[in-house]
Amino acid sequence: MNLNDIKEEIIRLKKEKDICILAHAYQRHDIWEVADYVGDSFGLSVQASKASNKNVIMCGVRFMAETVKILSPEKTVYLANPIAGCPMAEQMDVDMLQEVKKQYPDYTVVAYVNTTSELKTLCDVCVTSSSAVKIIKNIDNNKILFIPDCNLGDYISKQVPDKEIKLVHGGCPTHVRITEKDIEKAKALHPGAKILVHPECLPRVTALADFAGSTTEIMDFAENSNDTEFIIGTENSIVEHMQIKCPDKKFYALSKDCVCHNMYATTLMDVYNCVKGTGGEEIILEEEVRLGAKRSIDEMLRLG
């Protein structure tokens, strides 16, 4: 089989078996081409909940598949590649968060959506990178404990200076690879290009960018901008996606090392095997965990 044969068979099987395929923006482009929806993690879970399909395959990482199951308990949800995890989501466990909460008993616990379902059960509200500032502004309490990404937390704290925001050590090991030197080199090579970064980057990197936002916001900014050259400071797959989407514009990686190996773990053949029923892993959540995690997501929707 060649790539086109595989893609055609995936499309045929997903229709036959009533499967909705979700692809996170950091997935390879050949996976994008067989997906029903492409986007950020929480947006994909919402799309899955609205879809009529009984079965869902997440081409992303584990916490994303868990979020799909939280919002769509009646659906059968699969993670295309079972080893695809998120190091940031796994940086804290339940015992650790319980201890931290004891130290800050009067703080509202805000969790980045990039966390495990178990951790979400201990949190008051979830946020995405695009909704965090608005939601935290809408929280009545001025004392916020933000987990687990210190870089995103620092970015939020600068946007909401009237809140006392405590950060717990943690962050994305992919975005943290981008440095100030990378920006200096990129500016020297492409002096007319706009620098677009994700707020999971180090604060000193974000401060030097022309724009900071979620993956979808970065892509929308570049697509709608009158500028024609962009340096992309997020997972490098976005460079290729935007080159294909906007062939009249130029896109450059801010750092060749900004590669998420967990996202790249999923291949087109993983998706093929999953739709065939010979691969992937069904996501099972205990109902108590699902409902506890959903409470923090419901609060996000209420506030945002």
Image (tube, rainbow, N blue to C red):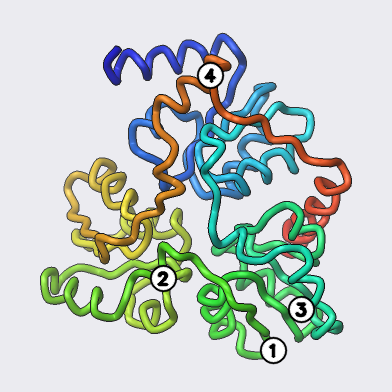
Question: Which residue, given by chain and number where applicable, does mark 1 sit on?
Answer: 164
Q: Which mark is residue 63?
A: none
- Label 4 close to label 1 by CB (< 8 Å): no
Residue type (three-letter) at the residue carrying disc 1? Glu
Left or right: where does residue 136 sit relative to residue 229?
A: right
Mark closest to the chain's N terminus, 2 or 3: 3
Residue nearer the viewer, 96 or 302: 96
Graded by Cα atoms within 10 Å as few (under 14), some (14 to 19) or many (20 or more), the crowding at tag 3 reads few
Marks 4 and 1, how far apart at CA: 47 Å
Q: Quadrant of residue 210?
A: bottom left
Residue type (three-letter) at the residue carrying disc 4? Val
Question: Which residue, given by chain and number where applicable, does mark 3 sit on?
Answer: 100
Residue nearer the viewer, 114 or 277: 277
- Above or below for 277 versus 255: above
* Camera-nearest label, 1 or 2: 2
Residue type (three-letter) at the residue carrying disc 3? Val
Mark closest to the chain's N terminus, 3 or 1: 3
Q: Which mark is residue 275?
A: 4
Graded by Cα atoms within 10 Å as few (under 14), some (14 to 19) or many (20 or more), the crowding at tag 4 reads many
Question: Which residue, given by chain and number where applicable, does mark 2 sit on?
Answer: 176
